[in-house]
Image: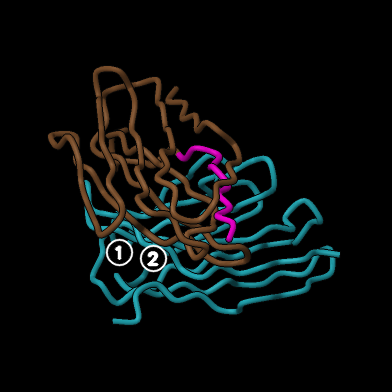
Chain colours: A brown, B cyan
Amino acid sequence: KQEVTQIPAALSVPEGENLVLNCSFTDSAIYNLQWFRQDPGKGLTSLLLIQSSQREQTSGRLNASLDKSSGRSTLYIAASQPGDSATYLCAVSKNTGTASKLTFGTGTRLQVTL
Amino acid sequence: NAGVTQTPKFQVLKTGQSMTLQCAQDMNHEYMSWYRQDPGMGLRLIHYSVGAGITDQGEVPNGYNVSRSTTEDFPLRLLSAAPSQTSVYFCASRLLPSGAQYFGPGTRLLVL
């Protein structure tokens, strides 16, 4: 059974810092990995999608990497801002027959302080 | 594109009542799914569908029914609400086999 772990569970950094969020998974036979952010009381917003054949994806100040062999992904946030404060979740997709299913980590709660 | 939409945003039910949570997407995605999110439990898959007329169970299907008569709509029915079904419910959709998943804004359900 696929297990997805995110460390740390919570993180507080001052504005302007660069930071790295970690995601690890136990089964490397994945279709892709996706990073989401969730603001309190809101739905999940897709940030980046990395297919299994890719090593990284970038969008603005965000960069996500994928190392399938070691079962790890990192989300790098450059020059953090208070607006980045949210919970960040990673999810891996695996083919289970009729359709690929996502397995989610429990998230990292990020707070960026002024 | 409206993306994935859900109604209602918030609902209070009494134990034993039934209701339907609505979900629609306008991206022509084959795959649609329902999750519940509870503190400390993360997101858990309730039911999913890979196309009109095809549905299947996820991790926690008991107490819920779904149907998929069109590509756009995927309603979730609570047959007889229980307090254990108090949760936030999210609908999601994506292109198969490996497209990005998009979520709706959620429905907060309180069962008294």
B97 shown above or below A9: below
Read off the residue under disc 2: B68
Q: Quadrant of the C terminus of chain A?
A: bottom right
Foreground: A16 or A49? A16
Residue sitting at x 29%, y 70%: B71
The secondary structure that most of the magenta stretch takes on is strand
Identify the mark nearer the N-term, 1 or 2.
1
Q: Is residue B51 left or right of residue A14?
A: left
* Quadrant of res B54: bottom left
User: What quarter of the picture does the N terminus of chain A occupy?
Assistant: top left
**Residue at position x 49%, y 29% from top?**
A5
- Compared with B89, A110 (above or below) is above
Q: Residue at x 29, y 22 (%)?
A: A28
- Chain to which the residue tagged by mark 1 belongs: B
- A42 in the magenta segment: no
Residue B91 in the image, given as x and y percentages of width and height? 47, 63
The chain holding disc 2 is B
Helix, strand or loop at disc 1?
Answer: loop
Residue A110 place in picture, x, y as percent: 55, 49
| Numbered disc 2: secondary structure | loop
Q: Residue at x 64, y 60 (%)?
A: B88
Q: Which mark is residue B52?
A: 1
- As measured in the structure, the alpha-carbon distance from the residue carrying label 1 to the one carrying label 2 is 5 Å
Q: Position of residue A46 (x, y in %)?
A: 36, 58
Query: Is B55 on the left or on the right of A106, as rendered?
Result: left
Question: Which image quadrant is residue B50 in?
Answer: bottom left
Q: What residue range appears in magenta?
A: A104-114
Can see residue B33?
Answer: yes
Residue B15: % across, % down: 84, 63
Q: Does the residue at mark 1 contact the one at mark 2 (Cβ under 8 Å)?
A: yes
Query: What amino acid does circle 1 point to?
Result: Ala
Q: Amino acid at mark 2?
A: Arg
